[in-house]
Image (tube, rainbow, N blue to C red):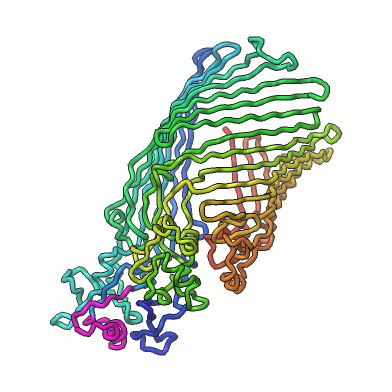
Amino acid sequence: WNLVGDYALDWNGGGTGNGNTFRPRTSADVFNYGPYNHIQRPDKMYAAGGFANYRINEHAEVYVEVMFMDDYTDAQIAPTGNFGRTDQINCDNPMLSEQQRDLICTQAGFTEPDDIANVVVLRRNVEGGPRTDQLKHTSWRLLAGIRGDINETWSYDVYGLHAEVSSPQVYINDFFIPRIQEALLVVENDAGEWVCSSGNPDCVPWNIFLEGGVTDEAIDYMSLNAVVVSGTETQMLSGNLTGDLEDYGIAFPTASEGIQLALGAEYRKEYVYIRPDLPRQEGNIAGFGGATVPIDDGFNVTEYFFEALVPIVQDAPGFQDLTLELGYRYSDYSLAGSHDTYKIQVSWAPSASVKFRAGFNHAVRAPNAGELFAPQNFGLGGNNDICANQPSTGVPAATLEECIRTGVTPAQYGNILPNPAGQYNTFGGGNPLLDPEAADTITAGFVFTPQGLPGFSATIDYYDIEIEDTIGALDFDDILQTCARTGDPSLCSLIHRDTSGTLWLTTNAFIETNNQNVGFLYASGIDVNLNYLASLGDHGFLNMSLIGSWVEENRFANPLTDYDCVGYFGEQCGQPMAEWRHRARFSWETNFNTVFSLAWRYIGSTDNDDFSPDPDIGSPGDQELWIINNADKLDAENYFDLSATINFAENYQFSIGINNILDTDPPLAPDLSSTGFVGTYDPLGRFIFTSLRFNF
């Protein structure tokens, strides 16, 4: 399909024209990019590792670890195109039919043959086929150290680490933006041949105004491969001492064991680089929202830590064991300042059958290299411009007053084109001024191992986690809607509309979404782990287990929104957040060196977040669309996996299995990636695997 301005090519394969005339564009004139994108990419990986150690004497052992990995994969996405990257068509262009010339030139006031009409072209390179990204990762890790016992009380471990990851990436079959515009400015020479008005003899006209008019030569001229080389390096020096102070008589008189200590220090240096080629640096690759900025930066951190295990009461009536665990870490970051981390945990076992435990942990996570230094460039964020004409109604969802706050002029209101693909421009990336995130975690639970039921154990833990100053970006939709509602200048200043009033048509249209310390996360729930090993006499053992999680709350808040995603999926909540999910396994461990296993994976049902009663994520106006597409609700899913493992010849193990034996398909929805189905459900159906492992 050709989309030129507000017109589409009336192709003779299904329209009423001759393949070289325009008709008004409709909502059906959109490109389906889904079939081109891989759900699972082909991948080839090589990995190797080596370990060596040499004991010098009873006090010193030298050790070395070397790891290597090389991974290559091809990622395929839909064809590139002219995504509004050009805005000029000459009115004496021989590629235009008279009807086309009248619509985009004469009726627009461009009446002279040499006039240049302002026309924004949106057209996929369907003739050139999909784009391919050749992605390669090569990493290696070298660790060397020395460890040993100083005496019967103290042990030490000192080591150094150097690790590197390099990732050269080649993006194939994209368009070079300057050549797109050049190939659209076409004239007829004295010999009656169509040539580019630039006079470049290598330029080939791109005739998108006639069905079947695009040639391979034109595609070859505009096509370009782009290259980016990126990577990271980590260097670390660490040392620790561990000791049991019972030898010094440092112990509670009510305990049979002494206090155990661990203390140490660590220095770590992180470095990241991104080196794009010149077309990527200049932002001249059509399939990318903007320029890729080179990065060459890093940070370092010095840390000191201390941990203690303190038995208080042991082997006493009602106190089989009462132990306190303490920890403290001081971190000094070159970019994020100094911070304290600490924990306190207590466990109490009144008998050998029951243990209760509870703890508090204050943790700090400094921003990583990507969050600090990721290039600030264009991307795709929001799914709707409330000031554009809505596809379902043909008018804006917001009022004129609200849209003026977002940068819309009165003349533009009611005339702004929505993006047919529901994709809008953002400008975001790293921020070297980020502060660390801080989390407070409270846990409480118990372990039950009844003496009267050998082989059975149950663990139930409650967690309550609060994270402040979370690192992230204000969402496109949140910024736009809150600006429209409140007129907050700090938010409205982040909105940049182009001359047509859109937030997607040109690179001048975007909303700023750089990383900030903007959020608050809260999660609570209960984790369950049940195990039972039952004897079958001469037939072996039956091993049964269940690991499940019940989510009570999973809430995200920032200055603009505050919503809970439990039971929902969608544009705001992302992956389905079921209230309950579990994995159960039933294994028969035979007496003939074979184990048969049946696994049951369960994921609870979820609703589309547009159906939430919370106005921060619910959107009643979009509910009908989801219902029509059967994407308003995801039913509960059950997956069953069957496997067998055979041990033979002492050092060999053969495994065979079938995952998703009922061949259950994943749920369907208009946007597979944004809802996270691939990461939650089985996208490929029934899967058969085998493996052979041996030791030597």
- What quarter of the picture does the N terminus occupy? bottom left
Q: How many marks?
A: 0
Q: Residue at x 32, y 73 (%)?
A: 120
Give 376 or 231, whichever is nearer the viewer.
376
Q: Residue at x 35, y 40 (%)?
A: 297
Residue 406 in view in this figure: yes
- What quarter of the picture does the C terminus occupy? top right
In the rendering, at what x and y percent does residue 353 appear? 81, 31
Q: Is the residue 281 above or below the residue 58 in the image?
A: below
| Residue 147 is covered by the magenta coloring | no
Q: Which residues are magenta?
A: 91-120
Q: Is the residue 248 above or below the residue 471 in the image?
A: above
In the rendering, at what x and y percent does residue 341 appear? 54, 31
Q: Is the residue 389 above or below the residue 537 in the image?
A: below
Q: Residue at x 37, y 68 (%)?
A: 505
Residue 142 in view in this figure: no
Task: Give left or right: position of 276 versus 613.
Answer: left
Give 4 or 622, whichever is nearer the viewer.
622
Which residue of the protein is positioned furthest toward the right in this rendering? 452
Which residue of the protein is positioned furthest toward the left in this rendering? 190
| Residue 93 is covered by the magenta coloring | yes
In the rendering, at what x and y percent does residue 214 appear? 32, 76
In the rendering, at what x and y percent does residue 647 appear? 67, 39
Quarter of the figure with residue 387: bottom left
Q: Residue at x 46, y 75 (%)?
A: 389
